Image: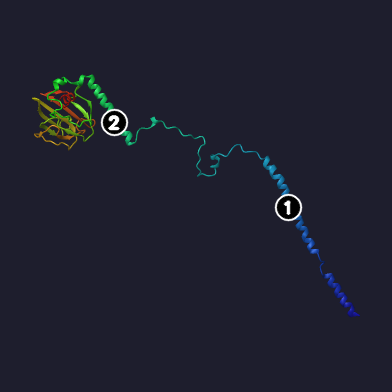
Amino acid sequence: MAADIEPNATTSEKKALAPKRGSSRTSGVKPMRTVAIFAAVSALVAAIALPAYAASKPAQAGATTLQQMAVGDAQSLVVASEATSAPMQRGTYSATTPEEIAKKKAEAAAKARAAAAAKLASSGGASRLSEADLRLVAAGSGEVRYPLPQGSYYVSRTLGSGHDGADMVASAGTPIFAAAGGVVRTSADSVGGYGVAVIIDHVIGGQRVSTLYGHMTYGTRAVQAGQVVQPGQLIGKVGNTGRSYGSHLHFEVRVNGSLVEPVGWLRANAG
C-alpha cells in the first residue's frame, strides 16, 4: 500500500516543479512587439515633422561669397568679384624690343638729317663762297674724297656761329679717310678741344688746302706727322674725344688759310 502511494506522490511533485509549456515564449514576444510599435511611430513623426521644419526655415540672404568661404581659412585666396582688368594704353610704356629701338633711332636720324638739310638750304649752304668758287678740281675725278663712307653719317651743323667746321654724326668706330692726298702736319691724341686729331696739308688745283679731322677714338690714328697719304687712305676712326658731346667727326677745310664751308666744298670737288 505504501509502495503504491509513493510513486504517485513523486509524480505529483515532478509535475509541480516542471514549468508550463509556452510561458517563456509568450513573455519574449511582448517586448519585441512594443519596440516595433515605437519605431513605427518615430518614423511617422520624422516623415511629417522634418519637411515642415525645412519649409519653415528662413532662406539665406544671398549666395555665399568667396570672402565668407575664406573666413575660416587664413590660407584661402580671396578675389573680389568686382575686380576688372584695366585696358593698357599704348602711351603708358615705351619701346623695349631691339627692333623698336632700332626703328626709333633710324627715325630720329632721318629727322636730324632732314633738319640739317633744311638749315643748309635756308642759309644758302652756309658757305662764304659759291660752289663755283669752291671748285678746285673736276667733281668726281677722285682727287677729292668724302672723309666718311656715304650713308654712314648725317651733318648736324656746319660752319658758322663760332663753329669752324662740319659735324658729321656717325657711330663710334666708323672709318675716317683722307679727303685728298698730301702730307700729315699733325697727328696727336690731344689737339686742343679737338681731342684725338689729324691735320693734313694738300695742294689741290694749285691751291694750298688743309683739312682737319677731330674727335677720333683713342688708339685709332693710322698716320703719323710727316707721312705722305693718298686720297681715301684710312687715317683713323670716329670717336668722342676732346670737347665733344657724342660720337662724330669734326671736319674743317681751309683754302689758302681761309675757312670754307666743308659740305659745299666736298660737293663741288668730290661730286
Kindly report the distance in space between the C-alpha atoms of the residues bearing marks 2 and 1: 94 Å
Quadrant in which the C terminus is drawn: top left
Quadrant in which the N terminus is drawn: bottom right
Q: Can you tell which of label 2 and label 1 is closer to the viewer? A: 2
Closer-to-camera residue (208/145): 145
**Residue occupying image coordinates x 27% and y 26%:** 112
Which residue in the protein does label 2 denote? 106
Number of marks drawn: 2
Left or right of 77, for residue 52 = right
- Categorize mark 2 by other alpha carbons within 10 Å: few (<14), some (14-19), many (20+): few
Left or right of 82, for residue 31 = right
Closer-to-camera residue (257/191): 257
- Label 2: element kind: helix
**Residue occupying image coordinates x 88% and y 80%:** 3
Residue type beneath disc 1: Ala
Give x and y (percent) for residue 115: 26, 24
Give x and y (percent) for residue 80: 51, 37
Which residue in the protein does label 1 denote? 39
Q: Quadrant of residue 53?
A: top right
Closer-to-camera residue (151/79): 151
Give x and y (percent) for residue 195: 17, 32
Q: Quadrant of residue 100?
A: top left
Image marks 2 and 1: residues in contact by CB distance under 8 Å: no
Q: Decide if residue 125 is in sight here.
A: yes
Q: Quadrant of residue 134?
A: top left
Q: Residue 23, relative to residue 127: is it above or below? A: below
Q: Residue 20, relative to residue 93: is it above or below? A: below
Tell me which label, 2 or 1, sits earlier in the chain: 1
- Which dot marks residue 133? none
Residue type beneath disc 2: Ala
**Residue occupying image coordinates x 31% and y 32%:** 103
- Categorize mark 1 by other alpha carbons within 10 Å: few (<14), some (14-19), many (20+): few
